[in-house]
Amino acid sequence: MTTSSGYTYINWNAVGDEVITHLRNILRIDTRNPPGNEIRAARYIRDVLQQDGIASEIVGPSTDRGTIVARLKGDGSAPPLLLMSHTDVVAVEPEKWTHDPFAADIADGFVYGRGALDMKSMVTMELMTMLLLKRAGVPLKRDVIYMAAADEEVGGHEGAGWVVHNRPELIQAEYGLNEGGGGGFEINGRRYYTVSTAEKGTARFRLRTTGKPGHGSMPHEDNAIIKLATLLSKLDGKQPPVHFTDTFRGYITGIASSQPPDIARLFLAVLHDEATADAAIDALPLEDILKLELRAMARNTVAPTILKAGSQINVIPSQAEAFLDGRTLPGWTTEMYLGELQAIFGEDIDLDFIDPSIPLEADPASPLFELIKAVVEEHDPGATVVPTLLTGGTDAKHVAQLGTKVYGFAPELYIPGATDWTGVHGHDERIHIRAMQWGTRVLYDVVAQFAARAQFGTYPSRQRR
Ligand SMILES: [Zn+2]
C-alpha cells in the first residue's frame, strides 16, 4: 500500500464499499436499549479488528452489556486520541417505517436502519479508521484508542460510565472524537459543518407543593394542585436569561464569517448584548426550529415534562409534584442555576435536583479543532466549520471526567435534499451512502494527520483527490 514517495495509497472506492458493508452488518444486529445486548455488536467488531491483527478487549458490568476497546500504539511522544461511539440504539415502532429497521435495506442511495445516524455510522467510520491506520502502517506519535460503548441511550452507566469508573486506563486520552457534530446545514446558500465543543449539563428536578387534603365536594383554598399550577404558569413565556459562552460566540461569528455583509450584521447583532439577544435571534432569516435551538443554546433552560397529583376524582390530594427538565450551560453549577429558578418561581419553593450532570466545554480553538476545520474545508470547498453547543447530552459527560477534551465530530457530507436528521430517534432513520463514504475519508484524514508522527504530519492528505 506504500508508494515510492512514501505516501500510502488507499483505494477509496474499495474502502467505500467496505465501510457500507460493515455498517449494514452492524445495523442488522438488534441492540435496542433496553435491554441492549451490545455484546453482539462488540463481538462483530472484535472479529473485524482481529482480521487485521488488531487486538481488542470487551469489558462491562455483565456478559451481555459489552463495551469494546482497542488500541493502536504510538511512540508515546504525544498523548492518546480516543475514537468513541456507542453501539446501542433506541426503540422502534416498526409499523411506522417503510423498511424493516433491522434489515439495513438500501434504497434511493440510503442505508435504512435504526442507528444509521445515531450512531452506528460513526461506530463503523471509526472502526474503518482503525483498520486503515493499521493497514497503512501509519507511524503514530499518539496512541489511537477505539471504544464502542454500550448503554449510551439510557445514560451510559453500563457503558462509557462503567469504563471510566472501573477501567479508566483503557481509554485515558487527551482528546476524544464522539457523536454530536460533524453534520452539515445550509444558511442562505452557504454550507456549514459543526464540531460540538460544548455540551449542556442536566439539572432535572422535582417541584412539590403541599396543601390540605379534603373531599372533592367541598373545595377549599389550600389545594396542592392549584398551587402547583400557579407555580408552573410562571414559566408561560419565560425562560432564564441569556448568557454567552465561547462556543456560542464561535458559532455565531463562524456563521457570520461566510455570509454577505447584510446577513452577517444580523447574526453579529445577536452577540451585541445578552439583554437584546432574543430580539436579535427573532430577526434572523432562519426557520423557527433553528431559532428555537439558538435560544436554547444561549441560556439555561427549564421545561415541565411530568405531572403527578391525586388518584381519585373525589379526593383533594395533599401533595402535587411536577418534574422539570433543566439544562445548564458550561460554567454553571446546579446551585447557580437554582438562583435563576428562584428568580422565576420565588425563593420559597420545595425543589429537589435529580442526579445532575455537569456541563462541558472543550476549547473551540484547539489544534484539533483547527485541523478538523482544514480537512473539512478541503473536502467540501466553500464550506465553513463552526463550533456548536449540544443542548442534549452524550457519553462525553463520562469521558470528560478523565480530563479528556471531547469534540462531537461524526462527519457526514451535506447533500441538499438528502441530509435528514429527523430520523434520529424517529422513523425511517437512514444515512446517505455517499455522505458516509465522504465522512469516512474526512475522519481518516483528521485522525491520521492528528496522530501521525511529525514527518508524516501532512500525509496522506497530500494525495490528490
Ligand atoms: Zn447517540
Image: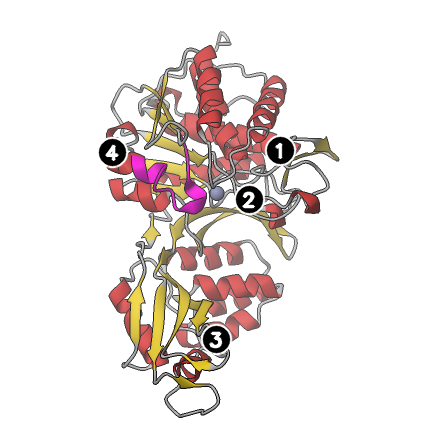
Q: How is the image coloured?
A: secondary structure
- Which amino acid lies under the numbered mark 1 shown in the image of this protein? Phe
- Which amino acid lies under the numbered mark 4 shown in the image of this protein? Asn
- Pointer 2 or 4: first along the chain: 2
Mark nearest the camera among 3 and 4 is 3
- Pointer 3 or 4: first along the chain: 4
Q: Is mark 1 within 8 Å of ligand 1?
A: no
Give the answer, above or below, for where 234 lies relative to 286: below
Mark nearest the camera among 2 and 4 is 2
Q: Residue at x 45, y 38 (%)?
A: 372
- Which amino acid lies under the numbered mark 2 shown in the image of this protein? Ala
Horizontal and vertical percent for residue 180? 47, 45
Q: Which residue is identified by label 3?
A: 312
Q: Which residue is identified by label 1?
A: 102
Q: CA distance from mark 2 to mark 1?
A: 11 Å
- Pointer 3 or 1: first along the chain: 1
- Pointer 4 or 1: first along the chain: 1
Q: Can you tell which mark lies on residue 303?
A: none
Q: Secondary structure at mark 1?
A: loop
Q: Are marks 3 and 4 in contact (CB under 8 Å)?
A: no
Q: Looking at this rendering, what residue extends furthest in the right direction?
A: 108
Q: Was residue 154 drawn as part of the magenta stretch in this picture?
A: yes
Q: Which residue is identified by label 2?
A: 91
Horizontal and vertical percent for residue 60? 34, 31
Q: CA distance from mark 2 to mark 3?
A: 33 Å
- Pointer 2 or 3: first along the chain: 2
Q: Was residue 211 drawn as part of the magenta stretch in this picture?
A: no
Q: Can you tell which mark lies on residue 166?
A: 4
Magenta highlight range: 148-162
Residue 299 seen anywhere in this rendered image of the structure: no
